[in-house]
Amino acid sequence: MKLLEGKTVLVTGASTGIGRAAAIGAARHGADVAINYLHADDAAHSCTEAIKELGRTAIAVKGDVSDPQTAQEFVAKAVETFGKVDVMISNAGICPFHAFLDIPLEVVEQTFQVNLHGAYFMVQAAAQQMVKQGHGGSIVAVSSISALVGGEYQTHYTPTKAGVHSLMQSTAIALGKFGIRCNSVLPGTILTEINKDDLKDAEKREYMEARTPLGRLGQPEDLAGPIVFLASDMAAYVTGAALLVDGGMYVNLQ
């Protein structure tokens, strides 16, 4: 069963990692897909080609989500190509690990602008289009387990992911009357470009694996199913929810 048959899905930060997995996962479930990306032209092309190989249509739109105009342009390009927006998956994010006491101002500001401001304006642009269309929609934001727990070298990152989680709760209220559902997924430790350098330390990686009841760290593809579910009509009565996708890490206090 294809859960997103006939839908148009937009995904930010989709050239690699969770965004790429979500975009291809949506295509596997029958969606046409528009992806946003910033730097990786070859990776973005590879993602759209993978979608086309599944028999779906795909476009890649380059742009920096920290610029509010990027959101308007991304949605406009998707509407120009597909005629509508059914689903927005707000995924783009950065996490430059740094100690708290001497973190540069520009690192803090960039992290907030990309992770929180970027999500805010992408969600708003998609919602504006969905309201205009008049047939509802679904918004899924990629938050993080870091919305619920702290991180010594993530003091600038964890507040942004808590903000994304909170944004979905508030937009669920603001947009419910338009038939637009807003939910978040909270990944645990997923092996992506964001943390590949941090997890090169074999001892740290083994520790993180040992903390996870399922005994392994996550792969980007582990997020595709939960995101597709929340985007689909199977979750028609789910809004304002947060779904942990962490292999059980959050509940393991041992």
Image: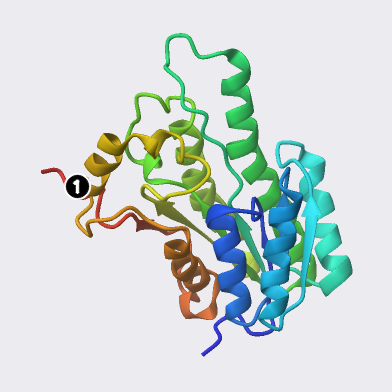
Q: Is residue 5 above or below residue 77?
A: below
Residue 64 position in % (x across, y down):
75, 40
Q: In the current view of this chain or complex, which residue is farthest to the bottom?
A: 1
Q: Quadrant of the C terminus?
A: top left
Q: How many marks?
A: 1
Q: In this figure, which residue is indicated by the disc labeled 1?
A: 210
Say left or right for 31 vs 147.
Answer: right
Q: In the current view of this chain or complex, which residue is farthest to the top?
A: 102
Using the rendered view, name the quadrant where residue 82 is placed: bottom right
What colour scheme does the image use?
Answer: rainbow
- SS type, badge 1: helix
Say left or right for 39 vs 20.
Answer: right
Residue 172 position in % (x across, y down):
54, 57
Residue at left offset 64%, top offset 70%: 137
Say left or right for 171 vs 127.
Answer: left
Residue at left offset 81%, top offset 50%: 72
Q: In the current view of this chain or complex, which residue is farthest to the left?
A: 254
Query: Which residue occupies the foreground of this view, 67 or 138?
Result: 67
Residue 46 position in % (x across, y down):
70, 62
Residue at left offset 78%, top offset 45%: 63
Q: Amino acid at mark 1?
A: Ala
Residue at left offset 46%, top offset 21%: 98
Q: Is residue 246 above or below residue 95?
A: below
Crowd tier of the residue under label 1, counting other residues whose Cα lies within 10 Å: few below 14, some 14–19, many 20 or above: some
Say left or right for 35 vs 254.
Answer: right
Q: Can residue 86 be seen here? A: no
Residue 134 position in % (x across, y down):
74, 72
Query: Which residue occupies the foreground of this view, 193 or 170?
Result: 193
Q: Can residue 106 be seen here? A: yes
